[in-house]
Image (cartoon, coloured by chain):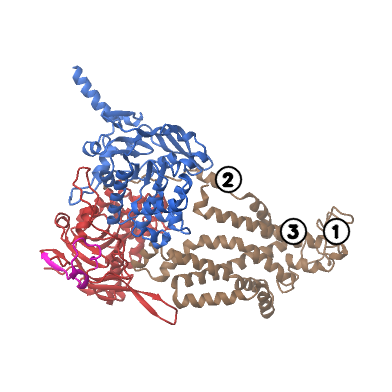
Chain colours: A red, B brown, C blue
């Protein structure tokens, strides 16, 4: 069995929040990510789903090395990512790219699209100008844009087209993993379908892996092979995406499914039994972080943190019910 | 649905865009500035006489040609040495505009550089530069300029550098603010994630996007620099005589003003007024023009 | 049949930009009705004119826009003919609005009590104790825990979901017959959104208020609405009962929208509509959708289609159903 391409093990990230004056350094900690573990293999899509404060953005920052983990390891091809320096670090940066949510902020307004896409090439390779232009044209075609748009500026494109440019840029250097942070949430419904279809097509053709972060379960389930559900910094359930949608085990996943909007007016609808608001990450509940809102909470849930257990092949849950 | 060849519907820049751009030019400031700029550039060909030599055969303190005692040979009169006022004004434009412009460029470059370093690098660099800016701002600008001028000695390029050194702080503060917000933009983060070196991020992503602000700031403060130069000249520590400068002309004529030789102070004064006014208006227009939200109203 | 609360007929709203030299036809000949207690879903993507339609109804168009034609009758009275002052009296008392961003709708400087009380104060003339009771009642209706304590607080102390509920309370405060909700849940988390939508449905059952729900999310329409109107390029392209449109959509755009929705648990490829929405300052000739339509006929490029009856209370603005009807008609003759 081949080693997974990306592996996170018991990763934690705490942010200090200073309270009190400069002399009295009493810090509180925002426990943004509290011991998460998952793997991504080549040509696979892992969906990461959760609501505000669940830590999915922090997770993406950790993978992209915008932040360093407080504890735990992130391994890429077996190597500890936090220890990378010099050429090894550059190799990692070349292999792992990101596409952000906002199509209007992702592209430098004063650069031509061709230069935007070739920037990773300029940083990592020493291809000649002509070779770079060729690669830019190649990659533009891959994302469904005409190669001659390379000379245009970002403001001449629509939102969906800009996301395509962002994807092209992410692919330019033979990337192996793209972190997609809510890539279609800011786009119109019909354009969303275009981009999702394009991404799926690219995965089939190029074998690139995705970490797809989203909040709409239906979209995430469509593009992902496996899904990890996060709540307040922890992964509560991981499963194959179809399995997760048909047989959710964790009460939070079940709530997400009930809360998901129906596809048809006649679809069976249950009332959401979930109450209350999402707690703040500054003061997370004791024991199982979900127990304050869980319709099936037991006394044990407030005291003991549940451990993730694999209940069926590929289906792991962290819950005291099991 | 042909996903692989979905062409974007791109709108080409229609020629009418250029015409509209021309229509939107700020007429008044340009109407004022263009003659001055032309005068400065072509001074050698336009000015009737050598500004540093007395006019042959003319008396001193000759009034402008429309007054008694005036002559059309010296249209705007002569000064206490018999030098032609008009020629001095024309050559003076060169000094004022060059010093004003170059001084602004030096101040702007220094200030923008500091602002970018401060905003982007953060940490102790930011603190150091900001404290330096605070200290610098506490110094009264003109007094400081005078002090520097007396120390290094007057010459055109020394004045340019001095003015640059005195006025860079206002750029640094504003640019730093812009950079702080630019730093969080996603395209900057993307460059960092792609492995771009800090220098590359600054040159490719930060600098082009602060240039707008820097330009507007420059056009709004060029007037200040021109007046500063005039003040220095007036006080005798600016561009040294006999090179004509408007401020110097004001200073030289000050004592004879009471004797009724008004044209020696009024004309240089009007020139300073017009140029500063024009640059202010231009700066205002530029600011509105470059602000994407205001532009389409 | 319920009494007709709102009747919009032939509404046309245009934006005049660049000093009047460029006219954007944001809403072009829109007509629909709303009965008491009914929920109408106004569906479409950005730029289709749904928000402009709502702003036209409540008279809150930006200065560059104007209603240039049509009528809006609320309980028989034409709102387009009202003065600004009369419109001010209608807003808040007869019509309540819930907008997308709660932080923009709430004034950070005023307490919750002040903001929720305001419509009741102005429109219902309530004072002191009865006003206080009304505010408590409203906050309880929108399920804010400990209302008496919460009303002394300020918006920044509340979460996004709670703020949106308070906006709902403000909308209800004047006792309106109609609430217009413009994408109120777009910025909310999924579970909070579900709670909020359940709340809105409960409030409707209790107070009998009619609801126009503007959204681009068909799932919300499936969950909440009785009828839906699909808008594209400033026109209503199909309108009818939600069940009818989901089961057998007649307009190609409706079909495309339904096909582009990801369905939970299904890996069926999503239908992606090629191209972009049109520039409303220079709309294409004929049917506005024809450049992107998979079933376009030659007629579509030259003639703007009219409304066709596809069933009881079901219209589509397309040449296709008409052609199908003609074919049936011809066959019946032959």
Disc 3 packing (10 Å; few <14; some 14–19; many ≥20):
few
Rendering coords of residue B168 (x, y %): 58, 70
Image check: A7 left or right of C7?
Answer: left
Instruction: Judge whether C236 appears above or below B179 on screen.
Output: above
**Residue A259 placement, left or right of C66:** left
Which residue corresponds to mark 3?
A: B270
Q: What stretch is highlighted in magenta?
A: A289-311
Chain under callout 1: B
Q: Mark 2 points at which residue?
A: B23
Q: What element carries label 2?
A: helix
Instruction: Please tell me which residue is depicted at 82% across the width and 57% down the height of the picture.
Output: B74
Front residue (pair B21, A252): A252
- The image quadrant where one finds the N terminus of chain C is top left
- On screen, residue A197 versus residue B48, left or right, reads left
Q: In the rendered image, is residue B244 in sight?
A: no
Camera-near label (3 vs 1) is: 3
Task: Say if mark 1 contacts mark 2, CB within 8 Å.
Answer: no
Q: Quadrant of residue A255?
A: bottom left
Number of on-image labels: 3
Q: Determine the residue positioned at 27% across, 77% down.
A: A83
Please name the predominant secondary structure of the magenta segment in the image: loop
Identify the secondary structure beneath mark 1: loop
Disc 3 and disc 1: Cα gap in Å?
Answer: 17 Å
Percent x, y of residue A124: 32, 67
Rendered-image quadrant of the C terminus of chain C: top left
Distance between the alpha carbons at the discs numbered 2 and 3: 29 Å
On the question of residue C121 being in view, the answer is yes
Circles 1 and 2 on the same chain: yes
């Amino acid at each position: 069995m081949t080693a997974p391409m990306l592996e996170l093990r018991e990763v934690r990230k705490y942010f200090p929040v200073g309270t009190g004056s400069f002399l009295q350094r009493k810090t509180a900690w925002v426990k943004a990510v509290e011991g998460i573990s998952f793997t991504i293999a080549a040509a696979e899509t892992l969906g990461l789903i959760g609501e505000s404060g669940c830590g999915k953005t922090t997770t993406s920052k950790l993978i992209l090395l915008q932040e360093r983990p407080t504890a735990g390891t992130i391994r890429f091809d077996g190597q500890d990512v936090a220890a990378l320096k010099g050429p090894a670090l550059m190799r990692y940066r070349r292999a792992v790219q990101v596409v952000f949510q906002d199509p209007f902020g992702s592209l430098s307004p004063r650069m031509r699209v061709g230069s935007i896409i070739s920037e990773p090439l300029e940083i990592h390779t020493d291809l000649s100008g002509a070779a770079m232009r060729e690669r830019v044209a190649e990659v533009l075609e891959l994302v469904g844009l005409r190669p001659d748009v390379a000379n245009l500026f970002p403001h001449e494109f629509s939102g969906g087209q800009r996301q395509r440019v962002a994807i092209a840029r992410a692919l330019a250097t033979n990337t192996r993993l793209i972190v997609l942070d809510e890539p279609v949430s800011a786009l119109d419904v019909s354009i969303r379908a275009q981009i999702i279809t394009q991404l799926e097509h690219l995965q089939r053709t190029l074998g690139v892996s995705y970490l797809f972060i989203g909040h709409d379960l239906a979209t995430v389930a469509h593009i992902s092979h496996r899904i990890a559900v996060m709540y307040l910094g922890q992964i509560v359930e991981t499963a194959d995406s179809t399995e997760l949608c048909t047989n959710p085990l964790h009460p939070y996943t079940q709530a997400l499914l009930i809360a998901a909007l129906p596809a048809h007016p006649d679809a069976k609808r249950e009332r959401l039994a979930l109450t209350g608001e999402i707690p703040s990450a500054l003061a997370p509940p004791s024991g199982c972080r979900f127990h304050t809102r869980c319709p099936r909470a037991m006394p044990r849930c407030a005291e003991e943190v549940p451990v993730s257990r694999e209940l069926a092949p590929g289906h792991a849950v962290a819950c005291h019910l099991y | 649905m042909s996903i692989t060849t979905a062409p974007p519907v791109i709108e080409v820049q229609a020629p009418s865009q250029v015409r509209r751009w021309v229509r939107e030019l700020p007429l008044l400031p340009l109407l004022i500035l263009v003659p001055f700029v032309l005068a400065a550039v072509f001074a050698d060909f336009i000015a009737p006489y050598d500004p540093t030599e007395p006019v042959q055969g003319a008396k001193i303190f000759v009034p402008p040609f429309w007054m008694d005692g005036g002559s059309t040979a010296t249209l705007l009169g002569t000064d206490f040495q018999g030098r032609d006022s008009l020629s001095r004004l024309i050559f003076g434009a060169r000094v004022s505009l060059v010093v004003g412009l170059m001084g602004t460029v030096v101040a702007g470059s220094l200030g923008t550089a500091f602002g970018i370093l401060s905003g982007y690098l953060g940490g102790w660099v930011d603190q150091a530069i900001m404290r330096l800016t605070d200290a610098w701002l506490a110094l009264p600008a003109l007094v400081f300029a005078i002090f520097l001028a007396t120390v290094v000695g007057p010459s055109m390029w020394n004045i340019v550098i001095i003015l640059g050194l005195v006025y860079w702080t206002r750029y640094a503060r504003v640019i730093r603010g812009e950079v702080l917000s630019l730093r969080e933009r996603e395209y900057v983060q993307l460059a960092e994630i792609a492995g771009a070196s800090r220098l590359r991020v600054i040159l490719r992503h930060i600098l082009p996007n602060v240039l707008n602000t820097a330009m507007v700031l420059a056009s709004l403060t060029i007037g200040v620099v021109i007046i500063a130069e005039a003040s220095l000249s007036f006080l005798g520590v600016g561009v040294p005589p006999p090179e004509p400068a408007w401020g110097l002309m004001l200073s030289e004529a000050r004592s004879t003003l009471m004797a009724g030789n008004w044209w020696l102070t009024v004309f240089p004064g009007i020139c300073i007024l017009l140029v500063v006014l024009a640059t202010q208006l231009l700066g205002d227009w530029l600011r509105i023009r470059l602000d994407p939200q205001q532009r389409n109203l | 049949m319920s009494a007709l609360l709102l009747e919009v007929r032939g509404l046309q709203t245009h934006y005049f930009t660049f000093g009047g030299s460029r006219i954007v036809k944001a809403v072009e000949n829109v007509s629909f009705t709303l009965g008491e207690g009914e929920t109408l879903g106004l569906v479409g993507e950005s730029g289709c004119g749904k928000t402009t339609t709502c702003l036209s109804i409540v008279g809150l168009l930006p200065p560059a826009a104007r209603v240039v034609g049509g009528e809006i009758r609320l309980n028989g009275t034409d709102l387009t003919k009202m003065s600004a002052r009369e419109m001010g009296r209608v807003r808040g008392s007869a019509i309540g609005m819930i907008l997308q961003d709660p932080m923009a709708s709430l004034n950070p400087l005023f307490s919750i009590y002040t903001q929720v009380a305001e419509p009741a104060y102005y429109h219902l003339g309530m004072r002191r104790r009865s006003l206080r009771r009304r505010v408590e009642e409203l906050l309880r209706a929108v399920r804010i825990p400990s209302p008496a304590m919460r009303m002394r607080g300020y918006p920044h102390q509340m979460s996004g979901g709670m703020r949106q509920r308070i906006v709902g309370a403000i909308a209800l405060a004047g006792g309106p017959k109609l609430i217009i909700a413009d994408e109120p849940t777009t910025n909310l988390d999924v579970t909070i959104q579900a709670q909020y939508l359940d709340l809105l449905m409960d409030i409707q059952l209790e107070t009998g208020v009619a609801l126009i729900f503007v959204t681009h999310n068909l799932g919300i329409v499936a969950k909440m609405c009785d009828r839906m109107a699909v808008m594209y390029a400033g026109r209503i392209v199909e309108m009818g009962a939600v069940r009818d449109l989901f089961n057998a959509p007649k307009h190609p755009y409706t079909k495309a929208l339904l096909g582009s929705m990801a369905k939970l648990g299904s890996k069926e490829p999503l239908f992606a509509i090629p191209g972009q929405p049109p520039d409303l300052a220079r709309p294409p000739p004929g049917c506005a959708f024809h450049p992107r339509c998979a079933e376009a006929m030659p007629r579509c490029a030259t003639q703007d289609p009219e409304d066709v009856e596809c069933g009881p209370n079901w219209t589509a603005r397309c040449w296709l159903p008409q052609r199908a009807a003609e074919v049936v008609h011809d066959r019946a003759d032959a």
